[in-house]
Image (tube, helix red, strand yellow):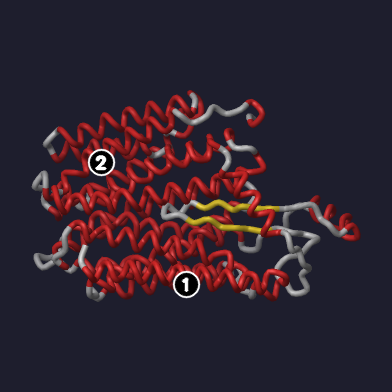
């Protein structure tokens, strides 16, 4: 890793540390004007690269007896009708589609990035590192931003930051600035998709709408490689950076759609909480919940599963094109379409395998899928035929499709109900670490021994996913529906 990359990572680290400390002091200064003892609800949003989000909600007993009857009446009221409900849902889906285009196109663009900038594969680790810092920065600043901005401005902020990232990419910037754009893209993606996900999750019948927006993410992952490869391979002298005009245009449409659909949620959050009461021990309650969550062994075991699973998924999507070009001597103009088969398989797997997985048992079926994935990965490794490998990769994505949703389903059975939100949030954060470490590690090792290291890396990650699934605790009868 050269000096430029090291300087960028060090600067991002200290920037994240400084802002965290600064916002912590601001939180202590303003928390008394932010909490209402009659309706105390604290929300902490935990953000990950896969754009999955959980909301931790703490609601202690109302301490003011004079307001108890008012509080109970509020609790029994039916939720108010959401204004422009379906335009808001469509806007959330578009946000996830933009994120999918960005994430799904990297594997197809990567060979052109390496050759244009004249870098080694270990430098690719910097791209994943800055992406991780973007998500980390968003996670650390999110709770403070929600104190000052309502939903609409936060969504617009996220969409705007993503537009800035794509604007900088279009004109083929120096490599240092190109690296920074990954920090910006992940930061905007985190703000935009996290709050879109949280909004949809709060709607009646949320399971249907959540399925729609996450399917839109996979649709973006499917479209991204096709457009990226088509643009990058259009001329002998590749103008691959022009691909980013496409996510830029979709990103602008996303910003406009968010601004119009959520125009009724553009007020400052501070204006919505004027006159709020005080609750001094709220942070203590949150700290106790975190400690209780981390004392559950199932949290750590499920986190281990997501650590390996997300590591395998992101590593495969990011490095398979470079492997096919360098090891199998494939044409880079054609190999760029292979990730589309992987993501398309995952899209179909989410749709078609959900019911049989539930019918025949989640624990049994996910382990069977893991064994099938391991076999397909061995085909990808040992059969030196590009067509066969492309089919194996598509089937690999298909059988990995239901892993994520099934893992969350199982978590609701092994975690105590009162701690489920915070426990799932921790699982996502830990899984994101795997999704950042293993692609970066693959690039660093590939710089020394070659990109063929991808294959044993994937075999190990898929095998570890299956074994970590087996050691999950069985759901306690107390927590069964």
Q: Is residue 265 among what the camera can see?
A: no
Residue at position x 74%, y 59% from top? 40
Which residue in the protein does label 1 denote? 18
Which quadrant is home to the C terminus? top right
Residue at position x 57%, y 56% from top? 198
Is disc 1 placed on a helix, strand or loop?
helix
Front-most of 339 and 318? 318
Mark 2 neighbour class, 10 Å CA radius: few under 14, some 14 to 19, many 20 or more: some
Question: How far apart in space, not on screen, are marks 1 and 2 (Cα)?
Answer: 35 Å
Specify which label sits upstream in the sequence, 1 or 2: 1
Q: Is residue 225 among what the camera can see?
A: yes
Instruction: Tell me where residue 399 appears, x and y as whole percent.
Output: 35, 34
Is disc 2 placed on a helix, strand or loop?
helix
Q: Nearer the viewer, mark 1 or mark 2?
A: 1
Which residue in the protein does label 2 denote? 457
Which quadrant is home to the N terminus? bottom left
Residue 410 appears left or right of 4: right
Front-most of 3 and 390? 3
Instruction: Tell me where residue 347 appears, x and y as whole percent.
Output: 38, 43
Residue 360, label in figure: none
Mark 1 neighbour class, 10 Å CA radius: few under 14, some 14 to 19, many 20 or more: few
Residue at position x 53%, y 40% from top? 299
**1 and 2 marks in contact (CB < 8 Å):** no
Residue 386 appears left or right of 184: left
Image: 33 above or below 64: below
Image: 238 above or below 387: below
Residue 388 appears left or right of 202: left
Front-most of 150 and 85? 150
Image: 319 above or below 5: above
């Amino acid at each position: 890793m050269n000096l430029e990359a090291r300087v960028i990572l060090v600067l991002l680290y200290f920037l994240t540390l400084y802002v965290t400390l600064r916002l912590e002091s601001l939180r202590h200064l303003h928390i008394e004007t932010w909490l209402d003892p009659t309706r105390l609800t604290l929300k902490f949003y935990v953000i990950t690269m896969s754009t999955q989000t959980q909301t931790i909600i703490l609601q202690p007993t109302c301490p003011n007896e004079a307001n108890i009857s008012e509080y109970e009446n509020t609790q029994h009221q039916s939720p108010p009708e959401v204004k422009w409900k379906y335009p808001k849902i469509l806007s959330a889906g578009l946000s996830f589609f933009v994120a999918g285009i960005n994430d799904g196109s990297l594997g197809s663009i990567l060979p052109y990035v390496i050759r244009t900038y004249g870098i080694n594969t270990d430098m690719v680790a910097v791209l994943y590192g800055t992406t991780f810092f973007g998500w980390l920065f968003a996670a650390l600043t999110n709770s403070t931003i929600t104190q000052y901005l309502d939903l609409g401005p936060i969504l617009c902020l996220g969409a705007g930051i993503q537009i800035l990232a794509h604007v900088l990419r279009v004109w083929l910037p120096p490599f240092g600035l190109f690296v920074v754009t990954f920090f910006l893209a992940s930061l905007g993606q985190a703000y935009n998709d996290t709050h879109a996900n949280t909004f949809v999750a709060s709607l009646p019948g949320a399971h249907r709408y959540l399925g729609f927006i996450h399917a839109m993410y996979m649709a973006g992952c499917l479209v991204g490689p096709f457009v990226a490869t088509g643009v990058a391979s259009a001329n002998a002298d590749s103008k691959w950076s022009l691909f980013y005009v496409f996510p830029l245009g979709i990103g602008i449409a996303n910003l406009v759609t968010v601004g119009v659909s959520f125009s009724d949620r553009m007020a400052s959050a501070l204006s919505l909480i004027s006159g709020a009461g005080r609750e001094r021990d709220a942070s203590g309650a949150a700290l106790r919940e975190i400690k209780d969550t981390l004392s559950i062994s199932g949290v750590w075991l499920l986190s281990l599963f997501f650590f390996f699973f997300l590591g395998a998924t992101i590593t495969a999507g990011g490095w398979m094109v470079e492997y096919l070009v360098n090891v199998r001597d494939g044409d880079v103009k054609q190999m760029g379409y292979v990730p589309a088969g992987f993501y398309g398989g995952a899209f179909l797997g989410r749709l078609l395998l959900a019911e049989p997985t539930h019918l025949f048992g989640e624990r049994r079926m996910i382990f069977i899928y893991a064994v099938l994935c391991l076999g397909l990965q061995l085909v990808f490794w040992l059969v030196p035929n590009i067509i066969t490998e492309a089919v194996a990769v598509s089937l690999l994505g298909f059988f990995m499709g239901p892993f994520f949703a099934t893992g969350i389903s199982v978590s609701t059975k092994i975690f105590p109900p009162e701690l489920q939100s915070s426990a799932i949030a921790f699982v996502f954060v830990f899984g994101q670490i795997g999704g950042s470490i293993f692609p970066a590690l693959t690039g660093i090792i590939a710089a020394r021994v070659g990109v063929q290291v991808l294959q044993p890396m994937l075999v190990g990650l898929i095998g570890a996913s299956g074994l970590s699934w087996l050691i999950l605790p069985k759901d306690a009868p107390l927590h069964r529906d």
